[in-house]
Image (cartoon, rainbow, N blue to C red):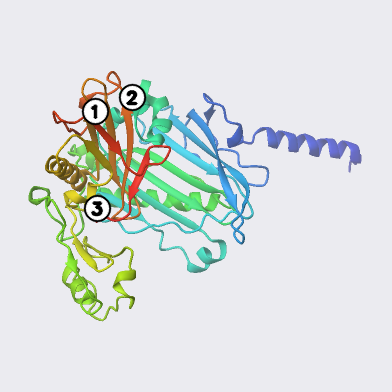
């Protein structure tokens, strides 16, 4: 038997360790644009790599944002944690996943990402997986969270081409680097967004741009793709605590190869009480209901029959209610209560609220135009919002530019309208880039109301 000295053994051990470390993937914080990744992203010495699908992935964009951290007891600021956003392009032409976005927030002992909404979809052309098969014990013990939302995007090439001038900061940051290669991308993609986090673990926000080969409303296509989405979400969840995991690419859809599918990504509401787009009628004012505490319940059930007649509304003085709303699964309608007034608010078949023109009063004040004309303009805005959920509007001034205003629905509050305003000089604005251009010979100005320093405003209730 041969004996090896302690010094030699230590040197051999150190050499083996150094070799193992040299083969570890580059840490995600150190990745430079242009780097090609094959074996995952490094997460640190005591964590297994972040799993990347097979193939070579070229980093096109890497940005860093500091997320403020607050003491959960005192609510005082206690530092920050870095969030790294990375956009990767698949080096394999024509692959199933041409692009991938990865956002990683590092471990921090007192950062609890909390539970985010992961509600069932109200659109047949959207999937939501809340991973209900996870054990309650695991979710409770580790504050584990994972949610996958998938939606089809048509005209994706054009979205990428227009990304450098997009009004969406996310689209601009993520897709602008890909704009020169837009011609190599598919026209239709399935955008799969998976959020996974764990208390005292990593937090991931990952978007896969998958080549779309079928309609999300087709059960056969759903049965083909959804198991891959679910497995990928579980892999990401395992990685949030530094565990070993892997991710595969989705397989091509055989039915699409046999018979090409006409892709239709338009919203298809799951509700049965929506208003078809062709039947939308925009009122000048809301048909408000005078309420007392005694008839609130009856009016609520009349608007939304899905509310059980045993449901008990809050017993508070009507005049003390600044603004509240009632919604229930199974109905697209919203019952809005403000002081002693009630409103039964309907939704379009695109799942957007149908407001009266008066909902858009008080956000922009056109100068030199009659109230009747302004009401007609607001009705046009209300129709656009009912159909698309957003409206881009230009109020042109005589020979010296236009006030550009965008209205859109808040992502979490179905009755909150948000808006932004920015003046554009004569050479800066293009009428074709707006949904509607509102003109009148008397218009001399359009003044935004209640906006902050960034030009943003909101209206909490429609009346």
Give residue 182's mark: 2
Q: In this view, does 63 lie above or below 150?
A: above
Residue at mark 3: 123
Residue situated in front as seen by the camera: 304 or 342: 342
How many marks the image carries: the answer is 3
Q: Which residue lies furthest to the front in this view?
A: 368
Tell whether label 2 touches label 1 (CB within 8 Å): no
Q: Quadrant of residue 73?
A: bottom right
Residues at marks 1 and 2, CA–CA distance in whole angstroms: 21 Å
- Crowding near the residue tagged with mark 2, few <14, some 14–19, many ≥20 C-alpha atoms within 10 Å: some
332 with respect to 72 (left or right): left
* Label whose residue precedes the other's in the sequence (2 or 3): 3
- The spot of residue 378 in percent (x, y) is 18, 43
Residue situated in front as seen by the camera: 220 or 361: 361
Residues at marks 1 and 3, CA–CA distance in whole angstroms: 27 Å
Residue at mark 1: 433
Rendered residue at 38%/34% (across/down): 171
Q: Quick one: SS at disc 1?
A: helix
């Amino acid at each position: 038997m041969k004996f090896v000295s302690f010094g030699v053994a230590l040197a051999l051990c150190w050499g083996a360790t150094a070799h193992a470390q040299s083969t570890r993937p580059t840490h995600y914080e150190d990745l430079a644009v242009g780097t090609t990744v094959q074996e995952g992203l490094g997460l640190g010495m005591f964590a297994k790599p972040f799993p990347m699908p097979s193939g070579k992935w070229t980093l096109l964009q890497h940005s860093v944002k500091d997320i403020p951290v607050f003491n959960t007891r005192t609510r005082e600021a206690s530092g920050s944690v870095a969030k790294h956003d990375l956009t990767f392009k698949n080096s394999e032409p024509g692959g199933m996943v041409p692009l991938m976005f990865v956002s990683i927030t590092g471990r921090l002992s007192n950062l609890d990402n909390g539970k985010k909404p992961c509600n069932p979809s109200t659109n047949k052309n959207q999937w939501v997986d809340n991973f209900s098969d996870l054990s309650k014990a695991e979710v409770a013990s580790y504050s584990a969270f994972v949610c996958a939302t998938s939606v089809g995007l048509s005209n994706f090439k054009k979205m990428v081409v227009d990304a450098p001038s997009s009004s969406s900061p996310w689209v601009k940051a993520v897709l602008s680097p890909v704009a020169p290669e837009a011609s190599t991308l598919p026209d239709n993609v399935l955008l799969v967004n998976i959020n996974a986090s764990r208390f005292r673990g990593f937090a991931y926000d990952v978007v896969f741009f998958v080549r779309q080969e079928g309609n999300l409303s087709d059960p056969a296509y759903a049965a083909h793709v959804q198991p891959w989405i679910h497995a990928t979400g579980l892999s990401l969840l395992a990685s949030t605590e530094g565990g070993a995991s892997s991710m595969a690419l989705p397989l091509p859809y055989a039915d699409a190869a046999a018979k090409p599918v006409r892709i239709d990504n338009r919203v298809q509401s799951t509700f049965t009480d929506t208003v078809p787009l062709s039947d939308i009628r925009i009122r000048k004012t809301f048909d408000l209901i005078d309420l007392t505490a005694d008839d609130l319940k009856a009016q609520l059930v009349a608007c939304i029959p899905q509310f059980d007649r045993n449901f008990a509304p809050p017993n508070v003085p009507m005049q003390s209610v600044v603004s509240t709303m009632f919604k229930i699964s199974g109905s697209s309608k919203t019952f809005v209560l403000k002081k002693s007034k009630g409103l039964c608010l309907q939704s379009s078949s695109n799942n957007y609220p149908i407001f009266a023109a008066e909902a858009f009063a008080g956000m922009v004040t056109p100068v030199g135009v009659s109230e009747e004309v302004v009401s007609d303009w607001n009705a046009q805005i209300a129709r656009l919002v009912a159909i698309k959920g957003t409206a881009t509007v230009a109020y042109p001034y005589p020979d010296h530019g236009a006030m550009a205003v965008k209205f859109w629905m808040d992502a979490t509050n179905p009755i909150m309208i948000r808006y932004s305003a920015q003046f554009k000089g004569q050479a800066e604005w293009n009428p074709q880039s707006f949904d509607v251009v509102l003109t009148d010979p008397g218009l001399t100005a359009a003044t935004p109301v209640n906006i902050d320093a960034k030009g943003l405003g909101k209206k909490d209730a429609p009346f």
